[in-house]
């Protein structure tokens, strides 16, 4: 027995060292062609769908670069003399509205995400009698069409003396963003073990201290998902910006629509304006896109 113990003991550290060896590099994923007919069909469908989505983007950019010479005769042809004059003209007309959109989007997205995070935290970790019913009623707000409440919202902002202002639009977008952000954070926090909350309570942390010291630092993936949803929806909003804001507070989408003249349309300038308006959301997805899928599915599996 003593001999067996002496022979077996040196083998254990070797196994552990083999598992913890930091020099072992992960094998890179290799891309290979499909090996079945179904695989080729899926690849063909994805390729056609990708081309179908990229062609309009290409047409918008080439039209914007055509300048005063006009768009090419064939819509897929590249301009003979590309010019940035259309972008200069569009920037001159849109830069004020782009600033308005930033002033509306950033605060509204941050506030709605924070409120949704608090709601999701309470509903998932501190349920009370009627909390599920309250959550269901809260989600109904996601399915109410904007057109159905535009008049009450207009009157509500008038009472607050916020109609026609950027602050009024922020208030509206925060209210409309609470249901979707609450849904995202409630599902996200459901996947976090309750033992963490209990351990914080044993250490003397109350409900708010637990939230700010424990839950909030763990909420980055949820904030990424909710933030992308909110920033995209608020930035692309047209109805609220058109009806509830004065011309001085118009967001970029409303001003972009007004680039269409009553008798003639400068398509180069219009397409350049479309590129400028779409660029912030594209940058947002490029920067945070790798965290989006992980955060979106974080609460799917416990």
Image (cartoon, helix red, strand yellow):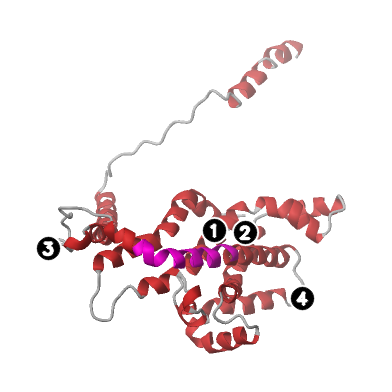
> Which percent across, then down, holds residue 151?
53, 89
The residue that mark 3 highlights is 73
Q: CA distance from mark 3 to mark 2?
A: 52 Å
Closer to us: 19 or 250: 250
Q: Can you see residue 229? A: yes
Q: Looking at the image, do the residues carrying marks 2 and 1 touch, with CB atoms under 8 Å apart?
A: yes
The C terminus: image quadrant: bottom right
Q: Nearer the viewer, mark 4 or mark 2?
A: 2
- Between disc 1 and disc 3, the foreground one is 3
* Mark in the foreground, 3 or 4: 3
Q: CA distance from mark 4 to mark 1?
A: 29 Å
Q: Are marks 4 and 1 in contact (CB under 8 Å)?
A: no
* Residue at mark 2: 188
Q: What residue would you read off at disc 1? A: 225
Query: Residues in magenta?
Result: 90-107
Mark found first going from the N terminus, 3 or 2: 3
Of the two numbered discs 1 and 3 on the same chain, state the one appearing first in sequence: 3
> What is the x, y in percent for residue 63?
23, 61
Q: Main secondary structure of the magenta part?
A: helix
């Amino acid at each position: 027995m003593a001999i067996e113990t002496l022979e077996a003991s040196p083998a254990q550290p070797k196994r552990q060292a083999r598992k913890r060896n930091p020099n072992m590099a992960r094998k890179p994923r290799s891309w290979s062609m499909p090996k079945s007919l179904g695989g080729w069909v899926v690849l063909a469908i994805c390729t056609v769908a990708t081309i179908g989505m990229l062609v309009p983007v290409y047409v918008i950019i080439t039209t914007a670069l055509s300048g005063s010479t006009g768009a090419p005769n064939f819509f897929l042809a590249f301009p003979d003399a590309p010019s940035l004059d259309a972008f200069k003209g569009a920037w001159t007309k849109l830069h004020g509205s782009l600033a308005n959109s930033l002033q509306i989007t950033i605060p509204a997205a941050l506030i709605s995400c924070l409120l949704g995070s608090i709601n999701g935290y309470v509903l998932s970790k501190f349920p009370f009698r009627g909390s599920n019913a309250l959550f269901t009623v809260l989600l109904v707000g996601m399915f109410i069409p904007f057109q159905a409440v535009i008049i009450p919202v207009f009157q509500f902002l008038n009472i607050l003396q916020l109609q026609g202002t950027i602050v009024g639009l922020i208030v509206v977008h925060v209210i409309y963003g609470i249901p979707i952000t609450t849904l995202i954070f409630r599902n996200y926090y459901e996947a976090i073990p309750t033992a963490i909350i209990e351990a914080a309570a044993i250490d003397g942390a109350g409900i708010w201290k637990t939230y700010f010291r424990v839950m909030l630092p763990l909420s980055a993936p949820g904030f990424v998902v909710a933030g992308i949803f909110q920033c995209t929806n608020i930035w692309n909003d047209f109805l609220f910006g058109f009806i509830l804001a004065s011309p001085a507070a118009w967001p970029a989408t409303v001003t972009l629509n007004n680039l269409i003249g009553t008798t003639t349309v400068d398509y180069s300038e219009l397409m350049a304006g479309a590129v400028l308006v779409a660029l912030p959301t594209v940058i947002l997805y490029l920067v945070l896109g790798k965290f989006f899928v992980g955060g979106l599915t974080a609460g799917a599996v416990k």
